[in-house]
Image: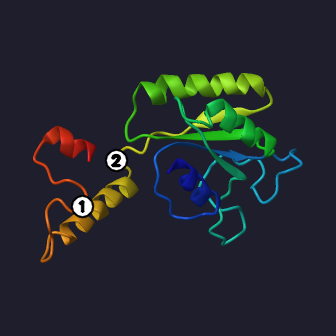
């Protein structure tokens, strides 16, 4: 999912995914500044002076904290190879916790130590952003729409009254 999310973000799509991605922008002195708004470190805004829906960042790379690759160091290095000097990490978590306040920043700092001419920042988790609330409502509306005639319990995701199972499903 994260790789698809990174690809969709890179082309200005409307992605759905999970975990963490990095967006990087090139600085004005970078030979690969390309279409990025030079010096910009804000992901998600269009380049100055254009009505394009293309993102203002130069590259997007997925990265993971544990077990799965590419890890944060590999994602960071890929952005540096792409000419990025400003790295923005977005933790694809709903709320703050140890990963977003301690583990991910530590991994970013370690990656930066390998690339001392770069800078990084981390966004806030998704939280109760209006877009998240809207997406949750849309998912619930989709499920409610399946409850009409022709709905057969047990088809698709399991129907359960267990709060534990329901929370995972």
How far apart are the alpha carbons under marks 1 and 2? 16 Å
Query: What residue did someone put label 1 on?
Result: 140
Q: Which one is in front, 141 or 160?
A: 160
Q: Secondary structure at mark 1?
A: helix
Query: What residue did someone put label 2 on?
Result: 128
Q: Which one is in front, 107 or 56?
A: 107
Q: Quadrant of residue 12?
A: bottom right
Q: Residue furthest left?
A: 161
Check the image and tell me how it is coloured: rainbow
Viewer can see residue 59: yes
72 sits to left or right of 133:
right
Residue 156 placed where, x, y %?
A: 25, 61
Q: Secondary structure at mark 2?
A: loop
Q: Residue at x 56, y 65 (%)?
A: 13
Q: Residue at x 47, y 39 (%)?
A: 124
Q: Quadrant of residue 138?
A: bottom left
Residue 47 placed where, x, y %?
A: 70, 61
Q: Quadrant of residue 54?
A: bottom right
Viewer can see residue 85: no
Q: Residue at x 13, y 62 (%)?
A: 153
69 sits to left or right of 155:
right
């Amino acid at each position: 999912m994260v790789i698809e999310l990174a690809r969709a973000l890179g082309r200005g799509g409307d992605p759905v995914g999970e975990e963490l991605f990095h967006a990087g922008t090139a600085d004005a002195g970078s030979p690969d500044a390309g279409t990025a708004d030079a010096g910009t470190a804000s992901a998600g805004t269009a380049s100055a002076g254009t009505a394009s829906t293309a993102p203002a960042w130069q590259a997007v790379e997925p990265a993971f904290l544990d077990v799965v690759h590419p890890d944060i160091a590999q994602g960071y290095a890929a952005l540096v190879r792409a000419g990025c000097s400003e790295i923005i990490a977005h933790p694809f978590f709903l709320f703050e916790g140890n990963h977003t306040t301690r583990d991910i920043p530590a991994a970013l700092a370690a990656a930066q130590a390998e690339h001392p001419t770069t800078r990084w920042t981390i966004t806030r988790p998704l939280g109760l952003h209006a877009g998240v609330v809207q997406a949750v409502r849309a998912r619930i509306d989709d499920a409610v729409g399946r409850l009409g005639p022709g709905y057969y319990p047990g088809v698709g995701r399991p129907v359960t009254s267990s709060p534990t199972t329901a929370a995972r499903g």
